[in-house]
Amino acid sequence: MFKEHDDYGFKDVLDGITMQLMCHGEHTLLARFKLMGGSELPIHKHPYEQTGFMLSGHMKLTIGDEIFDVKAGDSWCIPLDVVHGAHVLADSMVVEVFSPPREDYLKLSRSDK
């Protein structure tokens, strides 16, 4: 699969958080997220390994019992079923890989939402 860069196709995930499906295969899914300053990603967990890279912005990222001050250039990996969440301090752009691919994100990207 190949996908050229574009700035369209972002879908609402939560208040102040949108997602663009970039590319996916049998074992991974790559997505780009726009996070508005002041938005919250509530503490949650899921059966996906999640590896991320902050392109721009600033947030406090909780992974398990730790809180990280994340800025542009920082990266992380969240094991499957580990609780995590974030408080977005400034408008941010993040790229993340999920394994296995998230069916909910695949469905969202196909919707006319």
Image (tube, rainbow, N blue to C red):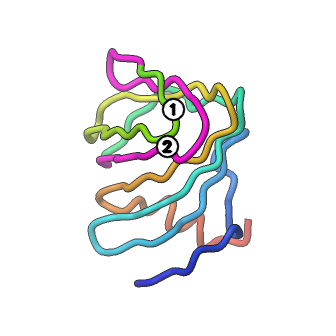
Q: Dividing the picture into quarters, in which one does residue 38 lie?
A: top right
Going by the numbered disc 2, the residue's amino acid type is Met
CB-based contact (under 8 Å), mark 1 and mark 2: yes
**Cα distance in 3D space between marks 1 and 2:** 7 Å
Q: Is residue 70 above or below residue 105?
A: above
Specify the segment rendered in magenta: 48-67
- Who is closer to the viewer here, 87 or 71? 71
Residue of label 1: 71
**The C terminus lies in quadrant:** bottom right
For image coordinates 44% across by 31% down, the residue present is 44
Q: Nearer the viewer, residue 20 or 102?
A: 20
Does 28 appear above or below 40?
A: below
* Residue lying at 41% horizontally and 37% vertically, measured from the top left: 74
Query: Of 112 and 10, which appears nearest the observer?
Result: 10
Q: Which mark is residue 8?
A: none
Determine which residue is flagged by label 2. Answer: 54
24 displayed left or right of 47: right
Query: Hey, what amino acid is under mark 1?
Result: Lys
